[in-house]
Image (spheres, rainbow, N blue to C red):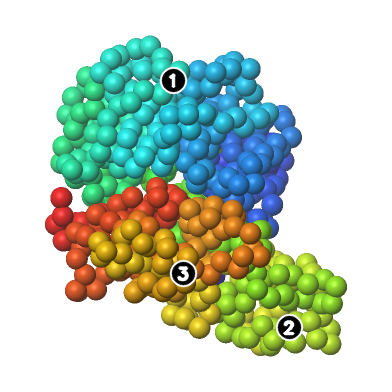
Amino acid sequence: MSKPSSVYLTGPKKDFKFITKEEKNNNLPKWTESNLKKTQTIKKLVCGSRFHFLVWKKPNKLEFYEKDNEKRKYQLPKNERIKDIASSHQTYQILTESGKVWSLAKSNHYREVPLLDADQSTFEKIRPVTFFEEKKLFVNSVAMGFASCYYLCNGDQLYASGSNSHGSLGIGQRGGRRTIPVYVQDKVIKIFAGSALGFFFITINPDLLYACGRNTFGQLGIGSTVAQNTPTIVKNFQGSEILTVSSGDFHSILITKKGQTFSCGDRNTNGLGVQKSIFTLIPQLKEKKAVQLATAFSKTLVLTDQNELYGWGFDEYFPTNEENRNRKFPSKISLPSFFTNYLDSKDQIRIATGSCVSFLYLDFKNILSHDLGLLFETKKFCDCEIGALGNKIPVHKSLVECRTKLTIDQIQNKLFGEKPINKEQALSFLKWIYYDEISDLEKLEQIFNLLELTFPPSVDNTLEKDIAQLYQDDDSKDFKILVKIDDEDNQDNEKEEIENEEIPNEEIPVHKFILYARSGLFREMFDNVNEKDNLNKVQDYTNKSIESLEILIKYFYTNSIEMTADQDPELIVDELSDAVEYYQLNNQCNFETELLKIKKQFDLN
């Protein structure tokens, strides 16, 4: 069950007095509750310099908080949905699902961003980076180092811009600045950066981890302390083994998918207490499984699968009363009582850190809730209404019924019968339906009592589980993906068959609202079709097999790639390798990681 989100921070009180409730101390040595509202789920919080941070809450909306200034709000065009945010110092890069990049920065820090009139830019406005659209490049992911930006385009092409100090762009030269992104190499599938001039990326074929940039303390993990202006292999690791990598000014941290934490670099900040130029397992975390990592300059925070928080490095604002802030080794950091009272899954706590400030916040980080949130706001493909007369709210019948295990008529009678609930209560109920969010515990409990449902919902009663069950409900599916048989005689006549209402040999039933929520491609298609046309089927012209498309559709419901024993894994991987780009999937869905699991399982190169 998801609980109200709340944000706690630790840092210099003088810099963050505008969001803290603490009045006594100049500094905030302990976790201090912020004034950020608890009623809206935070999808991601990212730190810039010590004076500001950016909060992503809704599909295309952002909030910016800066010292001595009131909160700023930004909204991208309605047809754009945020996919991810990267930050470094005074610059933020916002990636949308359409493959476009938007920037937010102060004018004197727009030097690394490819904008023609960068010197006129301020935090007052989000500005589009048009370079990629002009070059017809679809940006899959973004990362930022200090004054450097990295872009993964068209699935596997790496571009970089900004400062090339210490060779951090990996283009074979050292020094200078590239205001227009330059091509680095292809076959790249993941990119990582941090607060410093170091950069890491993973390639496929071969499956390797590379690093380039500043290496004064051996923080690239390549076995030397020489700066690298061309990508250099980080030995001892396969790319498919790695969950994440992040660099500070003097050290780098690597976490494997098994949860092991490795470190290299300066002895005072790497968590080892000794100088190392190769990634070395941190003894104090050997028995722990790390699931999240946050680094900044000279400090590190690691969260385990048991919601244990560890920190080390130098920072006078570590959340503790200890006088010595220079921690050479990881030590456990206590969580606010709010978190320990509300925890019920390993996936709820999020961590973020900047040069001085650190944040904790609750976020169910549910990809389905992120995608279904668009339905809640747009009401696209709603097929019924609930509510009192004259105050009806459009909803998706099959979604509401699968979440409550009640019919729409039963819900309508119980909630809007003799003593109808008000619209505010109804919206609180619907946030749980679509987001798995409990914005008002008391109001939702009242509604559950009226519906005669057990409150609080059981841990097993999650949005993910309910949507996975909805996949089995063929009766409520209202759309079909039509897949032609791979027959040369049919290829020239495939469009004519659809026009003549001739049903192809294969079809995949699906809920129209699931396609709209999970795929940017289908969103564009549905948005460009007149609803009066009552579109209920579409021919797939990708020449993918029925097996691959069935796996993709099931992924939309389950967030996992599942294969049967009689399916060809090599064919599936080959046909779905472009799915993230072609179907414009939410980058957080981690579809590529699921494919990599299949490749590793069946030893596919």
Which residue corresponds to mark 2? 412
Viewport quadrant of the N terminus: bottom right
Relative vertical location of residue 418 with respect to residue 245 in this rendering, above or below: below
> Does dot 1 land on a helix, a strand or a loop?
strand
Helix, strand or loop for disc 3 = loop
Mark 2 Cα shell of 10 Å, populated few (<14), some (14-19), many (≥20): some
Is 126 placed left or right of 140 in the picture?
A: right
Quote the CA–CA distance across marks 1 and 2: 57 Å
Q: Is residue 442 visible?
A: no
Residue under numbered circle 3 = 500
> Which circle's residue, 3 or 1, is located before the other in the chain?
1
Task: Residue at 30% x, 52% y: name it.
Answer: 577
Q: Up-down: is 224 above or below 549?
A: above
The image quadrant that residue 447 belongs to is bottom right
Label 1 sits on residue:
180
Image coordinates for residue 413, horizontal then vertical, percent: 75, 87
Left or right of 441 on screen, residue 581: left
| Residue mark closest to the camera, 2 vs 3 | 3
262 w.r.t. 306: above or below: above
Mark 3 or 1: in front is 3
Q: Return the disc, 2 or 3, that comes first in the chain's sequence.
A: 2
**Callout 2, which amino acid?**
Gln
| Badge 3: residue crowd in 10 Å (few <14, some 14–19, many ≥20) | few
Residue at mark 2 to residue at mark 3: CA–CA distance:
42 Å
